[in-house]
Amino acid sequence: MKPLAFLLVPALLAAQTAPAVPTQTQVIRAQYAWGYAGMDGEGSGTLSVLLEPLGGRVVMELHGLGERLMLLSGTQSSGYRVQIPRQKLDQTVTEFGALPLPFLPQLGSAEALRALLTEGRGPGVKTTKRDKQGPVKLRYEGHDEHGKDVTVWLNRTRWEQE
């Protein structure tokens, strides 16, 4: 009887620690307060993000004080559209990595955006505060579309993972 009990214990422990749904397939809804400082000045606003990993759907909306600075939406199969009103830019591309993302690192893929939000990984990105859900405060040091130095702070204000 004892040998059977020793065989069941590892199986029970493994069943208790296995996650119900892998995080790579979970939908993420997040909102961040953001601020930036660069050669052209300073600003602040909100960044709202929706990531649906199955199909690579991404929706991102970047707002400054009273205006939409960027709207990005699309999927892996249909492509991604980015609108940046200040630059009179309305562009559709087939690859996420071809998108010009203002105030954010060039990530290259929707998976890299997920890694930025869930793990704090990205070119020029440092995580300054974490909680059990992941990075709360992020700092990005890089360059804007004109090659000028820029620093961007993201502070997570809302996080939903389904």
Image (tube, rainbow, N blue to C red):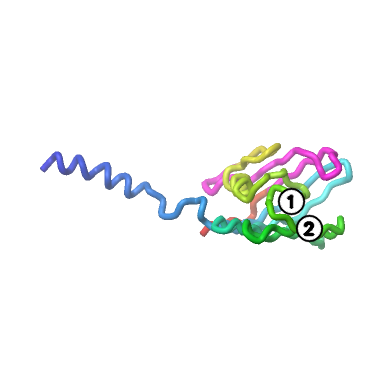
Q: Name the residue rendered at 66%, 61% in the picture.
A: 78
Q: Assess whether residue 55 is covered by the magenta stretch.
A: no
- Which residue was labeled with disc 1? 99
Neighbour tally class for label 1: few under 14, some 14-19, many 20 plus, Cα within 10 Å = some
Q: Name the residue rendered at 84%, 39% in the picture.
A: 147
Looking at the rendering, the stretch of residues picked out in magenta corresponds to: 130-154
Q: Name the residue rendered at 50%, 51% in the picture.
A: 23
Q: Position of residue 82 (x, y in %)?
A: 75, 58
Q: Residue furthest left?
A: 1
Main secondary-structure element of the magenta-colored stretch: strand
- Circles 2 and 1, Cβ within 8 Å, touching? The answer is yes
Please state which of residues 10 and 128 is positioned toward the viewer in this rendering: 10
Q: Position of residue 60 (x, y in %)?
A: 69, 57
The quarter in which the N terminus is drawn is top left
- Which residue was labeled with disc 2? 91
Q: Position of residue 17 (x, y in %)?
A: 37, 47
Q: Amino acid at mark 2?
A: Gln
Q: Assess whether residue 148 is covered by the magenta stretch.
A: yes
User: Where 25 sits versus 141, above or below?
Assistant: below
